[in-house]
Image: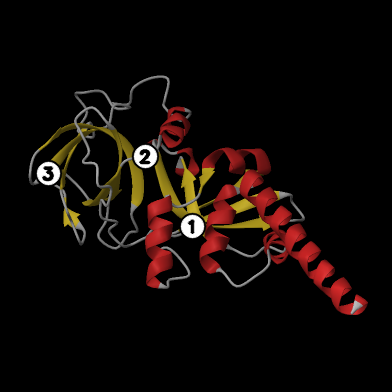
Amino acid sequence: TAALGTCRALYRLNNLMDHVWGKLLQQRWPAFYGAIQLEGAQTWKGAWVKILSGHRYLFEVHERQHKVGFAMSAMPAMVSYDGKKKRFHASYVSIVPHAQEDMSVPEMMARARAHPGEVLDRSRVSGARHVDPYAVQPFTDPEPIKPGEAVEVQWKGQEGSPFGWWFGQCHSIDSERYVIHFTHFSPTSRWYELVVPRNAQEPIKADGFGYTGGVRRPSAEECRRWQQFFPPNLFR
């Protein structure tokens, strides 16, 4: 009947408009898009309403609080939008209290990133609605990492802390470990080199300080983005 045809047309139009809302979110705030995809069970228009209403989402933020100790890292944070201030608020997942900061919309767009695609996929397959920032993320790429390649390494300073991802370069590799160089530090710095065991399934105490987890190969686009945060002068 005509009424049934009209209902079907409106249903298709509604789905099309929701697809447009999703594409807009993916282009403007991709970190939110990734977190909402994992959370599931909502329309994209509804997702926009939740974001603008101040709902908190878990993803990663580069250069936590602009502290040297978090240079060239992406740290997990619960992020929400404050409609009155027109600013974002990041509350970092941390063993340290009051690890928070506010950011303008352009700054959040520049510093926020979705969890890596393979991490989101792994969480989705397991049925999780959020990425576990404390979990070791194993290397799953069938193509082995080679010396000279850019890498991201899971590292944390304290046993009870969540992991962040830290950008570096694979210096060498053998059957048991990677040797990673963090080239934003001077070669004489204690933080320049880190030995990371391969195939870790749980946090492993590092030789110098802290704990290591997994290693991943960033995409070319991710590498370009990391370079935006590379300091003008090497840290010592």
Mark 1 lies on residue:
98
At horizontal 8% and vertical 39% (from top left) the residue drawn is: 174
At horizontal 23% and vertical 35% (from top left) the residue drawn is: 191
Give the percent coordinates (x, y) of residue 121.
41, 59
Q: Looking at the picture, tell me which residue is in the foreground, 197 or 53.
A: 197
Question: Which amino acid type corresponds to the residue marked 2 in the rendered image?
Answer: Pro
Q: CA distance from mark 2 to mark 1?
A: 30 Å
Q: CA distance from mark 3 to mark 1?
A: 35 Å
Q: Looking at the picture, tell me which residue is in the foreground, 23 or 138.
A: 23
Give the percent coordinates (x, y) of residue 36.
57, 62
Question: Which amino acid type corresponds to the residue marked 1 in the rendered image?
Answer: His
Instruction: Give the structural element (helix, strand or loop) at label 2.
Output: loop
Instruction: Give the structural element (helix, strand or loop) at label 3.
Output: strand
Q: CA distance from mark 2 to mark 3?
A: 19 Å
Looking at the picture, does residue 122 appear above or below residue 174?
below
Would you say the residues marked 3 and 1 are in contact, meaning their CB atoms lie under 8 Å apart?
no
Q: Quadrant of residue 33?
A: bottom right
